[in-house]
Image (cartoon, helix red, strand yellow):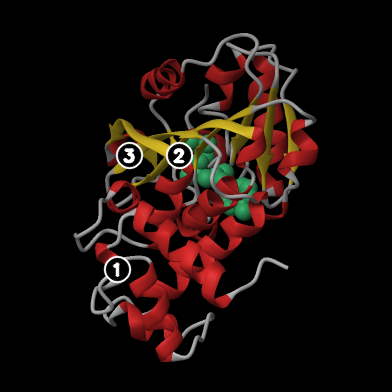
């Protein structure tokens, strides 16, 4: 792999902050990351933001089934060229915003492994999208800023526990795969990064419609995280009467004075069951 700094210089391009372009420049680290994903020659991989190919190359050296989605059209020819030097012409490159990608159509009944050194400014949105599309995503290995990785993995009760933690932990088992320091990137970021692994599953207790309501409950609860649950459920997008919000919390066995950041995923599920019974009908 050619160093990203050299490739950009030769092409008279710059790394765009607005696209979160901190390219991995350490090939050994890139190789180690891909080893840790455990992909094999039969794995169907979707790579998000291939950039100049730091991860695409070691992925394509393992499997012939790789689709890479890159938003920045300036990089596509450089990427194709890097792959072609190594005879890795089997990678399908799609020039598109991943947030607009129809992952289900792309998967065509296969279960994908998603890999990406994510653009930091939309990494939460990408993760929410993968949760929604997890019927066709088996596992994911994604690089985040270390602080965001800590929030995703956070457990109830702490400052880091957030809407993202609750939604992601409802839909997957999350593990820390490897930390990557700033010196492994070009340009060098100010912060440390962490790769997290996600094993997605569907909840046998909740169908898609009920799950949507669960996500709305979690969103409303965290939209005003300093407020007690009886107040956050009464405001926000659900907008229940306060007396009804209290009834729902009591039916779920949750003290009305608690705050969202103290609720486990199971408690959010119980609360959603009360919302479905007392507030929102399923039809
Ligand atoms: N995978 C490469 C690497 O590790 O060196 C690049 C990683 S860089 C942090 C993020 C990449 O995502 C960039 O190539 C950027 O252009 C691309 N990107 C940014 N926003 C995107 C979007 N909405 N959809 C697809 N790719 C995007």
Q: Earlier in the sequence, mark 2 or mark 3?
A: 2
Question: Which type of secondary structure does the marked residue at label 3 adopt?
Answer: strand
Mark before the other along the chain sequence, 2 or 1:
2
Neighbour tally class for label 2: few under 14, some 14-19, many 20 plus, Cα within 10 Å: many
Residue under numbered circle 1? 254
Label 2 residue SS: strand
Q: Is residue 172 above or below residue 40?
A: below
Q: Is residue 76 visible?
A: yes
Identify the mark at residue 194; answer none if there is no mark: 3
What residue is pinned by disc 2? 172
Q: Residue at x 42, y 82 (%)?
A: 245
Of residue 209 and residue 144, the one placed in the foreground of this image is 209
Circle 1: element type: loop
Q: Where does residue 244 sit, x and y in percent of width and height?
A: 45, 85
Q: Earlier in the sequence, mark 3 or mark 1?
A: 3
Near mark 3 (Cα within 10 A), the count class, few <14, some 14-19 or many ≥20, is many
Q: Is residue 13 visible?
A: no
**Distance in Å between CA atoms under marks 2 and 1:** 24 Å
Residue 212: x, y in percent?
A: 60, 61
Residue 242, given in percent of the width and then of the height, sits at 41, 90
Q: Residue at x 63, y 50 (%)?
A: 207
**Residue at the spot 59% in from the left edge and 41% down from the top edge:** 49
Q: Hey, which quadrant is residue 59 in on the image?
A: top right
Left or right of 111 on screen, residue 225: left
Q: Residue at x 35, y 86 (%)?
A: 231
Ligand 1, by image quadrant, is top right
The Cα atoms of the two marked residues, 2 and 3, are separated by: 17 Å
Which mark identifies residue 246?
A: none
């Amino acid at each position: 792999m050619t160093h990203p700094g050299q490739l950009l210089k030769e092409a008279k391009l710059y790394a765009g902050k607005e696209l979160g372009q901190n390219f991995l420049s350490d090939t050994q680290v890139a190789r180690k990351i891909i080893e840790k994903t455990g992909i094999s020659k039969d794995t169907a991989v979707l790579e998000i933001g291939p950039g100049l190919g730091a991860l695409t190359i070691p992925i394509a050296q393992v499997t012939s089934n790789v689709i890479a989605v890159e938003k920045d059209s300036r990089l596509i020819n450089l990427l194709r060229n890097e792959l072609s030097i190594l005879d890795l012409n089997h990678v399908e490159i799609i020039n598109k915003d991943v947030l607009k990608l129809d992952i289900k159509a792309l998967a065509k009944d296969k279960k994908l492994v998603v890999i990406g050194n994510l653009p930091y400014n939309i990494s939460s949105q990408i993760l929410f999208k993968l949760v929604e599309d997890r019927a066709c995503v088996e596992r994911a290995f994604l690089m985040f800023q270390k602080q965001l990785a800590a929030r995703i993995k956070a457990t109830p009760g702490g400052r880091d526990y957030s809407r993202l933690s609750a939604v992601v932990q409802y839909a997957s088992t999350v593990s820390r795969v490897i930390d990557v320091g700033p010196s492994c990137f070009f340009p060098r970021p100010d912060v440390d990064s962490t790769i997290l692994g996600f094993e997605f599953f569907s909840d046998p207790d909740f169908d898609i419609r009920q799950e949507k309501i669960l996500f709305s409950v979690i969103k409303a609860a965290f939209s005003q995280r300093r407020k007690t649950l009886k107040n956050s459920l009464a405001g926000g997008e659900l907008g229940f009467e306060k007396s009804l919000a209290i009834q729902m919390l009591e039916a779920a066995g949750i003290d009305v004075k608690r705050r969202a950041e103290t609720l486990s995923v199971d408690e959010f599920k119980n609360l959603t069951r009360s919302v479905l019974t007392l507030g929102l009908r399923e039809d």
